[in-house]
Amino acid sequence: MKKALFSFAAATAAPLVMFGIASTPVAGQGSTGTIVGHVKYMGPTPVNPIIRMGADPRCNKLYVGKRPTSEAFIVGADGAFANVLVNLDGSFPATPVPTTPVVLDQKDCQYVPRVLGARIGQTLQVKNDDPTEHNLHSASMAGNDFNTTQPIKSPPFEFKLKAGELLHVRCDNHTWMTGYVGIFDNPYFAVSGTDGTFTIANVPPGKQTVKAWHEVMGMQTQMVDVQAGKTTTIDFTFAPGQKTASVPIHDLVVPMQMATALTH
Amino acid sequence: MRTYRWMFLATFALVLGSIASAQQGAGSQEDTRAAKPCELPGAAAMNTPATDTTGPATMAPKGYVKDLMNYMMMPAAAGVWNAVSTSTDQTGVHENRPQSDDDWNKVIASATELAETTNLLMVPGRRRCVGGAIPEAFQTDWRRKAREVGEAANIALIVAKKHDADALGEAGERIDVACDQCHERYQLLDDDPTDNNNKVWGTWKPKAGSKAKPAALPKAAAPAPAKTN
């Protein structure tokens, strides 16, 4: 299930697109290389749906005079595409799992960051920095199951990630809240920033399969040739109507009494 | 061969599922008709059936404000909001607007339900699940806020009958603002005293030691100036 997750979709539907690949020498990297990339969105500016938080006055109060929207699409003026999860697919030598947790924050009644990567065996720490109660609920297909209430000012919830998958996290109290944790058995992953860039360091040399996934736009795959001591650049471009692969994500059926129901 | 056929079907199903999921997430409002009702007891049943000469001759509220919100107002408002929206999926950006007469009739139904439900909020004796009935001193303000939502919904109804999608979008925004303004004063939460600060408490009481204060009583209307001849 672990490694097969991303491989499955790529093998069945994704066309391999290769472009924008170049290598430049980098000093002091020894026997590994670095992949530096940029993700771009091309096409009409995507529109994120409005979130109406009136059901929870505590969330609503955080946005007085503003109109909160989903953050599914974060696209810069130059097309820089954020929150795209990039990872290498394949078998790699074992490396130590970080002892520091990956942190997912519940802030302003949304998940921050919306997309993040983690290692199998690493601790996922979820904080509640909101003035309201959240209910953290994972939709796991691989044993990363949790469903827990986090009252206001409660200590962070911690969960040791057990298996590789693209984990969908939601809040039963606020159905607009959605986040994704890519869980991998290797350290070769990154999430594109608001400038669209990402870096994957210490990559074993040789031909590598690089996958880029966005929650709406799907997944693209490219091959790169990583050389020891060098930086390889790679660009991904997502555009409407493009053929991409889907990744199986388990969705939740949220109990309605916990959803957007009004309370008074 | 059979294995490949299964793989193809599975992939096709996943792609369809992914697209459906993305579209669902784009601007749709949740259906609150399955929400948990107010747990307080409902209105008492009449001892005998009403006849021409017996039984109540006035409006008699049965549900709580919470239940009216979840079962009538939220679904109706969603019918207006979702009618004009913008969404993005794998195929691009989509402007969603009512297209057919059937589409417009559904919007008209939603706007009608929303506008008329605001009248139900004003029925004397209507209670909130938390905080009980609106105190007499705030009744005028409560009715005014309910009317604001009702008038915004009525604008949605008028423009829906004209099949004017742009105006419907604007009416949806006005509905949203009117809802928020009412919630800011009258929507109480049972577990968080600070959030109920400056709201109309009714029967709700803060925990001991809380510094929260209820909304100040509305200023009395200024007396009409004396007539001079």
Image (cartoon, coloured by chain):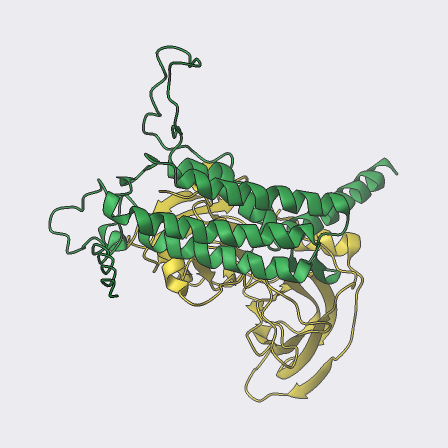
Residue A196's x, y, as percent? Answer: 60, 76
Q: Tell me what hue chain B is rendered in.
A: green
Observer-nearest of A117 and B180: B180
Q: Is residue B30 above or below residue A46?
A: above
Q: How many marks?
A: 0
The residue sitting at 49% across, 56% down in the picture is B176
Q: Is residue B19 above or below residue A195?
A: above
Residue A91's x, y, as percent? Answer: 64, 59
Observer-nearest of A54 and B45: B45
The residue sitting at 42% across, 67% down in the picture is A65
Left-right relation of B153 to B225: right
Q: Tell me what hue chain A is rendered in.
A: yellow
In this view, the residue farthest toward the front is B229
Left-right relation of A197 to A220: left
Q: Is residue A124 above or below residue B125?
A: below
Residue A250's x, y, as percent? Answer: 59, 45
Residue A188's x, y, as percent? Answer: 58, 67
In this view, the residue farthest toward the right is B1
Q: Is residue B44 above or below residue A116?
A: above
The residue sitting at 58% across, 75% down in the picture is A198
Q: Which corner quadrant holds the C terminus of chain A?
A: top left
In this view, the residue farthest toward the top is B48
